[in-house]
Amino acid sequence: MIRSLTLRILAIYLPLDLFFSTALCFAHLGLFDLEHAGPYMVAFAALWPFRFFGWAVLVASSLKPVSALALAGRRATDQEVATAEEALRRGRSRLPVIYGLGWFTHLALATLYMAWLYPEPEAVSAYSLEASLLLVLGVLAGALVFAVPLFLVLTNGEATSLSLESQMRGIEPRIGQSSLQHRITALALGLGIAPTLFVASLGYSSAGLAELELLGRDATSAALELAAAAAGEERVSPVEERHRAGAVMRRAEGITGPVAALASSSPVLAKALEDAVRQGKALSRVDRGAGVAIAAAPVDGDRVAVAVLRTSRERVSSFLIAAVAFVLTVLAWAPISAAMFSRSITVPIAQLTAAARKLVEDGRFSELRAVPVITDDDVGRLGVDFNHLLGLLRSLSDVSREIASGRLDVRVPGVGDLPEAFRNMTESLRSVVQEMSETSLQLGAAATEIFAATQEQEMAATTQSSSMREISQTMESLSESAAHVAEAVEGVLENAERTVETTERMVTRIGELNAHAGRIGEILEVIREIADRSDLLALNGALEASHAGEAGRGFALVAAEMRRLAERVTASVKDVRGLVEDIRQSGSSTGHGGEQEARDAHLRGGAEDHPRDAAAAQQHRAGLGGRARAHGRGVPIRRGDEPDARLVRDAQGSGRSARADRPAIPARR
Amino acid sequence: MTRGEGWMMTVADPAFRWGVDASRVERVIGRAEWSGAMPVDGAARLGGGVIRDEATRVMLFATETEALPVLARGEIALERVDGEARSPVPELLRRAGCSDALLGFVFRGPGEVTFLVAPKLLTPPVTSEESHA
């Protein structure tokens, strides 16, 4: 099954259209009885794609919202559903009409082609053209009668789905103003006029063609009779009438007189007749376009009998008048008949519609009367069902009134969901009332118990009030202790700030001292190198002195003294370096400790924390006092405000935190 | 140095004290200042093992060919040695062939002895063979 609505429509219309196109092409050709029908068939076939595919494009574009909605599925918005429904509603009313107009245009253009552009204009009869016009009108009516119901049937599924979807989304359906009676009338007109026009066109064309054929035979007979009379030396009088002329012509003189004048209405045949007379040949031809028949019969070597007949259209016109009269009769009778028929259908429907509207708008179905059932068809059955529904609603309304008045044992008549729901509702109401009754009894008993418990609780509250006063006094004293602790904490924090400043200055000084100690170390290293070199120098001096023997004894003593000096210097340098290193290490450890202390003091006793701690202590103090005062006044105590050990723990916790903070600062220093 | 008295360059090596005749020492320089050939570790040559000590010095010994650098660890001192303080090499060692290397002992106190060694003992074996050749 083709899921796309557009493709399904085109798949049904295309083969039917091809069939009807072929049939109408040959039917139209049959009106003309042409020997060379090729040009017409080519022209008819060339117009077909424009008509059908043009309409197909229009269908696709008009029903595009419907296709888009099918693709979107459940994700479609309300706007898309409304647009698709509107597009389908318009398409159902307009597209088949456009299809019929396309057929009308197609055949009208083909007829115009015959009238003005056909390659053999003398072969195209005026009768056939007039019959074509009847056929074009018939095709228009027939196409509408064919296309409109078929299009409605093909799109009924989508229209139903869209209507249900719209109502489910709460979109108000748009109902047009078209009347069912008008539709039935139009259908009856189309059904009556279309075949009438078809038959009339075929008959008129056949009559015209037969008239022309008879005209040709008459012309030949007339020419032969004239020739026979002239050959028998009878005197032949020329025929000179409005639609016919005949005479015996001499070949040398050619055609003259009334015959030539009548023949001139068909220039082609006039030329052929002139040639036939001058050559002494027989001739018999008909010009359908001009409605003229010409015949020539040779009498002897010098003379030729000639006859020219032109159609009078009287006999044919009478047929046309009869056909048109019949069509007019159909046009007059069909609406009357259709109106009477449709009224028999629409009157009961109108009554049903009025009753339903009153039911919806007023809601007072108890005042509604049953709709009359006057037909035994579908509409009649609809009326019967409507009356049954109305009766059911009335009985349910009566039952509702009974329930409202307190009668819960009322019997609900009828079958189906609604009566069943009513029965369930009354049963549930009975259960609820029963439960309420039992619950009321239980509530009475419970109220008595609650009253007794309340009296006991009142006595206990009186006893508890004296205990509360004692606890309140304890809380007051605890609050004062917390205030003292808070003041001590504030003093400690001020000392911590001063310590931080001192420590920072000390760290700076120690840093400078470390820098000086480093410089001293560098100088000591130079002194140590000098002493070392002096030691070596003295050692080598002593060595040289030893090499010199007795002469170097004195120098050896000097060298030895120099070595002792150098060694003492080295030892002193080592001692001094040790001292400097001790100073540097002490300075570094002190500096690091001071920096750490300063950071801790900042973190602990920063400008943001001091007020917070103080405020916390004050708040705690106020809380203790406030609660104590509340207890002292005997204010009722809630469960969360029980003056139990929690308050005592809070006060003790504040004291502990204050004591823990006070020694913490010097310990870090 | 005569057997009676003379000058001796002693090295207070952490392993043991050793000394040489001061006349055989040309000069003493710092280890960092020495840029010549790799010096011979004196204590290691004498069997004292290798002990890393940054405070070392180089003694240059006079030989027939070129100066011999000897690495000396510990304190270096130039001492006059009396004949009484110097003890000869015992007969047992002399018969074992040690008299060429060990010239004697110098006692300064209880447990404090200085080995007086011959400079050729400090010469590396290869150098010694070449010199013999």
Image (tube, rainbow, N blue to C red):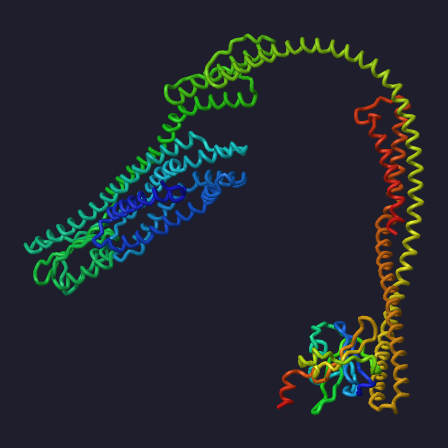
Residue nearest the viewer, comparing A614 with A146? A614
Residue A605 at x, y percent in the picture: 87, 48
Image quadrant in which you'd find residue A262:
bottom left
Q: Which residue lies furthest to the front in this view?
A: B91
Return the residue nearer the eye: A337 or B26: B26
Q: Which residue is drawn at 92% across and 56% down?
A: A502
**Quadrant of the snapshot with the N terminus of chain A:** top left
- Viewed as shown, does residue B117 lie left or right of A307? right
The answer to whether residue A368 is visible is: yes
Q: Residue most toward the left?
A: A232
- Determine whether, in the image, residue A163 is placed left or right of residue A201: right
Q: Is residue A311 above or below residue A565?
A: above
Q: Image quarter for residue B100?
A: bottom right
User: Would you say residue A247 is visible in this rendering?
Assistant: no
Q: Where is residue A304 in the image (x, y as percent from the top left)?
A: 12, 59
Instruction: Determine the residue positioned at 87% across, 73% down.
Output: A571
Q: In this view, does A183 lie above or below A27?
A: above
Q: Position of residue A164 (x, y in %)?
A: 48, 32
When asked about the image quadrant of residue A386, the answer is top left
Q: Residue at the spot x=85%, y=77% of the render?
A: A526
Which x, y percent locates residue A349?
A: 44, 23
